[in-house]
Image (tube, rainbow, N blue to C red):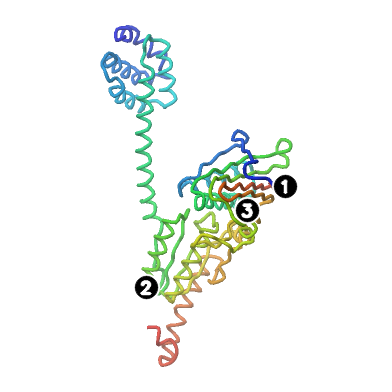
Amino acid sequence: MDDKNFDDIVINVHDYDMVLKIKDESDIAVSRQMAKSFAQKNNFSLADITKIATTVSELSRNIYRYAKEGQIYIKKKEKELDKDVSIEIVAYDRGPGIENVERALAGGYTTSERSLGLGLSGVKRLMDRFYIVSEVGKGTIVVLEKRRRGF
Amino acid sequence: MKDVIISKLGELVDELAKDDGQKKAWEDFLVDFAGVCEKAGIKEELKTSVSNLLQHISEKEMSDGIGLLHTKIDNFPAVDAYKALIEVLGQKNDENLVRIAELRDVLSELATPIIRLWQDVLLVPVIGTLDSQRAQNMAEKLLESISNIRSKVVIVDVTGVNMIDTIVGEFLIEMFSAVKLLGSDVVLTGIKPDIAHTLVKLGIDFDMVVIKRDLESALKYAISLSTKDTEKKLVNPKRGDTDEE
């Protein structure tokens, strides 16, 4: 994991198949549904579809709760046509940022009153690749990837 | 401009309409337009005709049509027409938002039934997506019914939930704790295999409640719990559960 700063990361909207704006609570359900049908369309297994939908739900919930607004980007990656397929999910916000990323990832840590503090650490376990950059006062970017399993 | 439109009416309608069904609509629109095109405040006048036309054609066709008219007719007020179109669409959008809010209210009323299945046994079938508003409503309603009916066991069936993330998990755990504080037991059932896997990865467990594999065994268990208590009382009324009633 190379240490980049928040400002170094540039997200090009055109690289992604889907851009979901998070602003209202109802956007969480919508983004989850869109992510789910995207995974379905790309023939992921039911268990992985649920994991992807849950992940997007967690991330958009975090955006809504802490940053108030932000975006979720989703794209399909493949080496050759229909080979080594994976889905990349990026959650981007310009919110308050996370003060202690390691502590947030350890689980059971939260700054919100009504929360188990399992979100980020859980998401990390649900996905195959997890990368996070967060700077206090600037925002948070989480990059995740889930590979499609062969049948 | 009025004369130009009237003289070319048939020709314009043929070009504008994608099929015969749209011809009448475009014709009406152009006649309306010819009537108002020389008045001041044309945008306001146009809004009515635009919204009439939108009943029959799509937004894209409308916008293409304005473009076409702009090339066909000199001095066609395309800017005013587009403005009218955008304002009408804005109104439509506002109406839709109101409608969505209303539907959401309807849904929250529909989706949280609390059923008295047996003496002292309540069933809560949780269906669909739980947002904080719905979750709150459901918990309140459930706790209210428990204390009214004095039920001993609550079966929570999550067959209708296709995803449990940490928020929904949290909410369920909170609700279970509150139910237990009222002195009722909770039986959880209906967790699907893919959800089970995700829950384990997320680190959520429901170890504070009894979990049964389907509604049938949950019901058997719940009934056995509630009747066991009654039998005990019948056999030995002086000892044990007398404090409960």
Residue at the image position 42 percent from the left and 13 percent from the top = B15
Query: Same chain, marks 3 and 2?
Result: no
Q: Nearer the viewer, mark 3 or mark 1?
A: 1
Query: On residue A47, which mark appears?
Result: 3
Check disc 3 and report its element: helix, strand or loop. Answer: helix
Which image quarter holds the C terminus of chain B? bottom left
Q: Which residue is mark 1?
A: A2
Q: Amino acid at mark 2?
A: Ser
How many other residues sit within 10 Å of disc 3, few (<14), some (14-19) or many (≥20)? some
- Residue A144 image position (x, y, % from top left): 65, 48
> Could you say which is closer to the camera, residue B114 or residue A139?
A139
Spatial CA distance of label 3 from label 1 is: 31 Å
Left or right: A82, with B158 as reference point: right
Check disc 2 and report its element: helix, strand or loop. Answer: helix
Spatial CA distance of label 2 from label 1 is: 56 Å
Q: Nearer the viewer, mark 3 or mark 2?
A: 2
Which image quarter holds the N terminus of chain B? top left
- From the viewer's perspective, is residue A9 above or below residue B185? above
**Chain ID, mark 2:** B
Q: Amino acid at mark 1?
A: Asp
The number of numbered badges drawn on the structure is 3
How many other residues sit within 10 Å of disc 2, few (<14), some (14-19) or many (≥20)? some
- Residue B233 image position (x, y, % from top left): 42, 87
Q: Which residue is mark 2?
A: B147
Check disc 1 and report its element: helix, strand or loop. Answer: loop
Query: On residue B64, which mark appears?
Result: none
